[in-house]
Image (spheres, rainbow, N blue to C red):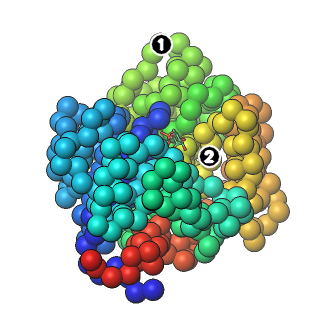
């Protein structure tokens, strides 16, 4: 199918459930469709305050604003009267489209391509479910399920066209890393230290890990963006509350609390570290794109479905890697997600750091072999809507 060569108009709907993953992914997609595929994007977001945290240029109190070529609308109770659906309507992560908007979709001369963007998983079943359709029960509309994933038969992984090149360029220039750290008010990079970024949910294992790092002998610089792990961090140190700008030194450990930054700066943080602890969905993908060893705090689900997802990812990620290296990665990810027995698992992981580094540096190419998510989405839309109206 030839690629779409004309700009389509897109409506992307994002309901921020909690945390930053939903808005993180939709904002990234909106940017990519606009800047790399010349599409016209309207992004509807129900919580602009969360949005503004990872994109400080957004004004949380405006009903409508243009930012970096994207029209951002506050998705409130009532839709603006002139909200006519675009050529493509995408609801992210199963959010429910407003009834008025659905009705407006039925009135379009040509029904919009309607896509539900699902959460990312490495499980095999997505190969069969990607692209499935579901007719609307009430209206003459068809919804398509678009599953991100790691295989050629899925919707792929969200990643900007040049992200690998940018990350490598950054990592090959130690002075860029040092300048970046200094821009955060931190000392220039210590070439002897291990740099660890740590973005995670609450986790009782953090105290044990910090004490282990403090005991040395390896110097560790631990950089923690403000977030849910801070309570456990401060409980395990002095008990005093911690906030952005605070630092703590104990033995071989230097710990710094960073302000929550915009997405691009967060990438630079990941590119500047040797090991990245990440969580959820989007930071998990960014750590893979950074090409460095990583530890994933998966978003916990009530029915424990996250364990299956964690293992499915590890199996896919570690294909072709020596068994003892696989074991090291698996053990640390399990220990971190269980919130216990972290030190033996950390030791094992660090022991295999070189092998894990080599693998992590190769992984982005494997993962993006069939094209990134935005490219596959454009192809998908082309297939549904091959000619301009
Ligand atoms: O915030 P999260 O825990 O989001 C989660 C997951 O998406 C999960 O799948 C979903 O079900 C749940 O929310 C509701 O983690 P995630 O996905 O990594 O999103 C964090 C976003 O914040 C990501 O886009 C990176 C960005 N970020 C910054 O921009 N600056 C920062 O300083 C940090 C730490 C993160």
Q: Nearer the viewer, residue 252 or 225?
A: 225
Can residue 185 be seen in this snapshot?
no
Q: Which quadrant does the C terminus fall into? A: bottom left
Residue located 44% across and 69% down the image: 377
Q: Is residue 281 left or right of residue 296?
A: left
Q: Which quadrant does the N terminus fall into? A: bottom left
Indicate the position of residue 198 as horizontal and vertical percent values.
52, 39
Q: Residues within 10 Å of mark 1 (few under 14, many from 20)?
A: few
Indicate the position of residue 182 as horizontal and vertical percent values.
31, 44
Q: Nearer the viewer, residue 23 or 10?
A: 10
Indicate the position of residue 358 as horizontal and vertical percent values.
62, 67
- Mark whose residue sits in front, 2 or 1: 2
Residue located 62% across and 46% down the image: 296
Q: Nearer the viewer, residue 272 or 64?
A: 64
- Residue projecting furthest to the right: 323
Residue picked out by circle 2: 296
Can residue 308 be seen in this snapshot?
yes
Residue picked out by circle 1: 240
Residue 245 falls in image quadrant? top left
Residue located 27% across and 64% down the image: 9
Q: Are marks 2 and 1 in contact (CB under 8 Å)?
A: no
Q: CA distance from mark 2 to mark 1?
A: 27 Å
- Residue projecting furthest to the bottom: 2
């Amino acid at each position: 199918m030839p690629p779409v060569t004309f700009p389509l108009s897109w409506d992307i709907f994002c309901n921020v459930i909690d945390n930053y993953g939903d808005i993180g992914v939709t904002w990234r997609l909106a940017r990519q469709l606009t800047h790399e595929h010349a599409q016209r994007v309207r992004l509807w977001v129900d919580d602009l305050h969360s949005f503004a945290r990872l994109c400080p240029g957004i004004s949380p109190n405006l009903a409508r604003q243009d930012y970096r070529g994207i029209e951002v609308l506050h998705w409130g109770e009532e839709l603006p009267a002139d909200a006519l659906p675009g050529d493509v309507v995408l609801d992210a992560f199963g959010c429910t489209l407003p009834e008025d908007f659905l009705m407006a979709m039925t009135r379009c001369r040509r029904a919009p391509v309607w896509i539900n963007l699902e959460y990312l998983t490495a499980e095999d079943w997505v190969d069969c479910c990607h692209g499935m359709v579901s007719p609307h029960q009430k209206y003459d509309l068809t919804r398509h399920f678009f599953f991100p994933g790691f295989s050629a038969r899925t919707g792929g992984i969200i990643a900007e066209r040049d992200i690998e090149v940018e990350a490598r360029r950054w990592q090959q220039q130690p002075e860029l890393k040092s300048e970046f750290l200094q821009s955060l008010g931190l000392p220039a990079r210590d070439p002897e230290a291990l740099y660890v970024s740590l973005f995670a949910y609450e986790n009782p294992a953090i105290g044990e890990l910090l004490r282990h790092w403090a005991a040395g002998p390896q110097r560790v610089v631990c950089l923690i963006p403000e977030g849910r792990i801070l309570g456990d961090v401060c409980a395990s140190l002095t008990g005093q509350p911690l906030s952005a700008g605070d630092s703590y030194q104990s033995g071989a450990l230097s710990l710094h609390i960073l302000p929550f930054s915009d997405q691009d700066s967060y990438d630079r943080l990941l590119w500047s570290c040797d090991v990245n602890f990440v969580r959820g969905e989007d930071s998990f993908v960014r750590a893979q794109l950074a090409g460095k060893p990583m530890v994933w705090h998966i978003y916990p689900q009530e029915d424990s479905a996250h364990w299956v997802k964690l293992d499915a990812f590890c199996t896919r990620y570690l294909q072709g890697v020596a068994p003892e290296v696989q074991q090291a990665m698996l053990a640390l990810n399990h220990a971190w997600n269980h919130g216990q027995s972290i030190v033996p698992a950390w030791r094992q992981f660090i022991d295999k750091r070189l092998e894990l580094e080599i693998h992590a540096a190769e992984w982005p190419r494997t993962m993006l072999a069939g094209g990134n998510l935005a490219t596959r989405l454009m192809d998908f839309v082309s297939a549904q809507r091959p000619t301009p109206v």
